[in-house]
Amino acid sequence: MIHALKNVMMVVVESLINKLEEDRMHDKDLASKAKKERQSGYYTDNCSDSDSSFNQSYAFMSQEELQLLAEKLDPSQPKEVRQEALQTLCLAPASDILSSESWPSLREHLTISLADPDATFSEKILRFYAKTFSSSPFNMTREVYTSLARHLELYFLSGEYSLHISAGLDVSNTDVNRLLKKVRLLNEYQKEAPSSWIRHPEKYMEEVVESTLSLLSLKHKPNHPASPDFLSPMHFLALLDIKAMWFKKWTHAYYSRRVVFRLLENKYKSLINAAVQQCLDYFEFCKAAVNKNSKVVDFAQQHCSDIQNFSYTGPELQYIYFVHSLCLLGRLLIYKEGQKIFPVQLKNKKDTVSITDVLVLFVQLIYYSPSYPKTALAAHTENYSPESLVMEILQVFCDQTGCAAECLYKDRVIDALLHPVQSLLNGTEVYINCLETTLLDVADILARIAASEDGLSLLLYVKNEKNAKDGPTAAHVLVQFTKKLLRDDISLLSGSEFMPVVKGAFVFVCRQMYKTCEGLEMLIPYGLHESIAEAWKKTSLLSERVPTPVTDADSSSSVSQESKSSLLWEETLLDALLNFSTTPKGLFLLHSTDAINDCVNFMFNSLSKKIQTNEYEDFGNRIIVTQMATTPMAAVALQNSGFIKALVTELWALLECGKDDLRITQPKSTPVDPIDQSCQKSFLFLVNLLTYPAVFELLSKRDIPNKPMYSFREVPTDIIDIIDRLIILNSEAKIHSLFNYEQSHIFGLRLLNVLCCELNTLLLLETQYKVSQVLLTAQEENVTETSEGPGVFIIDGLSVERNHVLVRINLIGGPKERILPLRELDKGSGLYPWPMFSSFPVPKCYLAEIPRKAEFRQDKDLNKLLKLLKGPEKPTEWAEICRKQFRKVMKARPDSISGPILAELIEKFVSYLSECRTDCYFSMESYKAMDGDVKKENLSSVQQLGVEMTVRYGKYLNLLKEDAENGLCFVLVNCEEFLKQQQRTVVSSLCCLQEHYAGYDWFASSIFLIMSGDRERTLTFLQQFSCLLVSAFLWLPRLHLSMHLPVTTVEYGIHPVYFCSAHYVEMLLKAELPLVCSAFHMSGFTPSQICLQWITQCFWNYMDWSEICHYIAICIFLGPDYQIYICISLFRHLQQDILKHTEARDLQVFLKEEALHGFRVSDYLDYMESLQDIYRPMLMKDMRTIKAQNT
């Protein structure tokens, strides 16, 4: 067997040797034939790495043969011998040659031979190099690359090289052509090497980098006569790689970037110096030409024709080098390691050049270098104008947060950007090439800066160093300029076809600022919303007057173009106005423009057109809708625009079916979660939308349809339909009309659960639709049928949901006062341990036992406070002394401030303040209470139910007696009559602006409980309290239709708690708790909405009674701004939960449904004091201006 195998192998080896000999003879014939061809014809350019190894013959060579080849390639050998050796070398595998022992001598000979005057010989070496680059690994090719780089370095330093910039460059020249081929091969390798060098030792990569930088930093000695005019290797590289793609690839990965920057900083800083110098020289050239009003030659546009050009002039070469330098510096400054190279010292400048100097230079290049209108540049696929290149660099800087903070966010850079704006604003002469393009570029960069937190702070608060004391910030300059643009008050731009585009660009910059709370505060004094609204009204009038197109084609097209332009500008202005509604105060200002309906229509139409919006836009739209839903007028506008109809229709298509019969290609998966993922987005949208102001406008005095029959294809179009078809399923017709009865009803019950967390909404739904009775009836019917006695409740998804809702809507209490049943089945022995019920009262197990009060011990600090309040003498600083003592007690023994002591404290303190003229914000009207008892029947149904709930809660807390209902009714009726004296008559279609306050008075009820049901004491307190500023923010009915507010404010139906307190909660949240602020934004929910809900119902159901008392006492004693600080403290307390539920995508549901577990007001008093130290001046100033809000 072995013998036979040996014979076979011998035959195979002999066959291979014979084949090898035949290949050698064939190669000799080819070589001689090629030699004759070279002698008779021109040798074509074939030095690229495109030759495939499949059409080349290889000769496997021994070490001895390779050694012989190295000797034959010695420059001292005859030309014919060297050519023959080179031909043989080209046929051998590159890997064998590079790994042979004779490679070092071979490389040395090849490096010298590259300078051979015979073009054919040197090009053959280049072909060998190209083949090596394409077929060998990096650890081998690096030596070939360094060989080529070394050759070029020697060549540029030799006496043979004599090219000068001033003489230009003729590419068709043979010597120049050869040199460009070598540099091109070098550049090709530079761009390919980074993809493989990470797999090899770092020293190999460092060799390549150092040899390159050594070559590129090459220059004649300073005393050389041709030194300034030297056409350097960098010029040639710039010709072949004008945008410095090689440098971009080398600095992309940290592995190579740190080596490149280390070498640049330590050994080759002259390369960076030269790049900076090149940019400075070009800038000086442009600036000089602009100042002389002469036209700057635009080299970027000279070679755009189809005619091939073979020569470059000196200025063109310098321009190409400048573009390369600009791109290189732009890439360098992105990275921290690159920034460390600065400052640099230039030869002809005394001062060093810093990063800020370079950025200012870049900005100045925008308006001093040649530029064209944007439409003119669109024709060219590659645009090398300085303006467009600088814009690319600055846009990248804006996107890199760290880089922007280090480089771009400097006041000198902002001043440079604002230079043309400031000049136009001041009416000074402007030396700019293309004003419109410059302004558009400046606006683009400023808008990007304003989009980031640090950039926005820079624009809003940092002043120019030169005018640090009284100079305006960038924001002030921008808003003044924008207003001037909107008035068409810029003479240099009058008549420009780009005027609307420029206006839109600067309006967008301002929009980036005013859509934040802090930016809006800065811009409010300028009345920008009024200017934009005025421009919109003017544009909408003009668009209505556009004539009907006639038969003439030219006039028709011009009219059509004009109408399109006018429509686009009108939509731009509407979009700008719409974005005011991202903040509470901004939405308040939007109401004053009378454009709310048009803005909502525009938003709905825009959303309808967009099949798919990106996630960021989606968050923005949800925030706008959430803010609008908190105000009655905007909620009505959402209804009228068709937005709510579209939302309900989409929801029904997901839950049940669409309008049309759609072909089902794949059956829907059976939902597992109570609310399926496909419906989650619609559910959250409804939760955001259905705040009490919106619910009241949409449902007030509207009856449920309760039709005798519903068709399967009858699609709801309104919120009342959702309640009818998904929540109040009180008939067989409704149940049978649903395809997915259980899933759809659970959706409705979950929605009802969230809605009823807002107590005013609960009262409205209960009084109008008897929700509790509907649910109780459903529970009663959901029992097993037995012949003996009452049946047992059937435990299923619906009965569990109904049980939870029934407990929630019929019991009042904080986290430690009521126990809500879970909506999940227990995996243990007891499947569902919570007792179900089908009639009232609610089982006692859902109410926690009130802990017995600890025996009251005398407290020195509390006694001192009581003594201060009761004492007849009131020194000048009496109120402040009381506040300090109150803080002391709250921190030491907060539980002592409760019950009768709390009632006495706030009663005495308010009585004193109401007698002090400086503390009275509202005028105090005399009022005599009604005589006799007031019955429940004197109140509206909503108030009656509110009284029942209050009294039930008060009895549970052991604060009220059996006859407390009449006392509370007395207080509510007298409060309403007392406040009527200070109300104005308003004619409005809004339901909330009718005679009675739209909701229940939770604050008055809270005071009634604090006063232990004493009606006279409660009414007296509320009368005295009504003259204090704090009453405007704690007692919401206080300002219903109030004459103390401007008539416009009253007509909008927006309470100061929303546009003042809630607005500043959002503003402080961004500064104090940025993670929470971002979580709200990502959820498409707003802090202002939940804060308004908390404050409106005085934190009932969210805090325990003791904490509600502390909230009221702190705001009365320490000031109305503490309402804002308490909300911020709450978000701080909830931070981890907020982040967790943002990730789970149910933040708004969590905040509305969950009580504030573990929160104690007194625990955060120190934190609130720290907030007071920072923000009180600003907050109190604005709170005191609610009588005359600047709209």
Image (spheres, grey):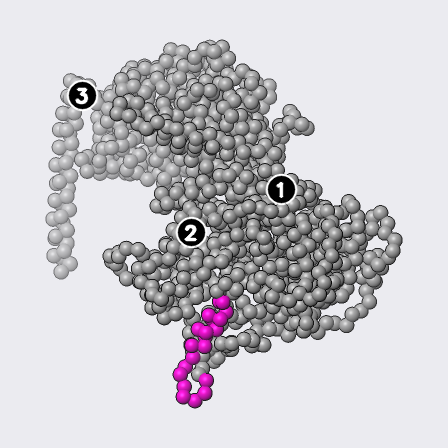
Instruction: Give the residues drawn in magenta, as a range.
Output: 770-790
**Discs 1/3, front:** 1
Residue 776, magenta (yes or no) = yes
594 drawn magenta: no
**Going by the image, does 1069 lie left or right of 902?**
left
Q: CA distance from mark 1 to mark 3?
A: 97 Å
**Residue type highlighted by circle 3:** Arg
Q: Can see residue 64?
A: no
Give the total of numbered labels: 3
Label 1 vs label 2, nearer the camera: 1
Q: Residue furthest bottom?
A: 788
- Measure the C-alpha gap from mark 1 to mark 2: 31 Å
**SS type, badge 3:** helix
Say above or below: 299 vs 995. Answer: above
First reached walking from the N terminus: tag 1 or tag 3: 3
Choose between 924 and 1114: the one closer to the eye.
924
In the rendered image, which quarter contains the C terminus? Answer: top right
| SS under mark 1 | loop
Quarter of the rendering containing residue 557:
top left
The reply to whether the C-beta atoms of the residues labelled 1 and 2 are less than 8 Å apart is no
* Residue under numbered circle 3: 38
The one of 980 and 1139 positioned closer to us in this rendering: 980
Identity of the residue drawn at 68% across and 69% down: 964
Q: Residue furthest right?
A: 873
Query: Label 2, label 3: how many angstroms apart (C-alpha)?
Result: 82 Å
Residue 660 at x, y percent in the picture: 28, 55
Q: Quadrant of residue 719?
A: bottom left
Q: Position of residue 598 (x, y in %)?
A: 45, 40
Q: Nearer the viewer, mark 2 or mark 3?
A: 2
Reading the image, the residue beneath label 2 is 644
Residue under numbered circle 1: 1046
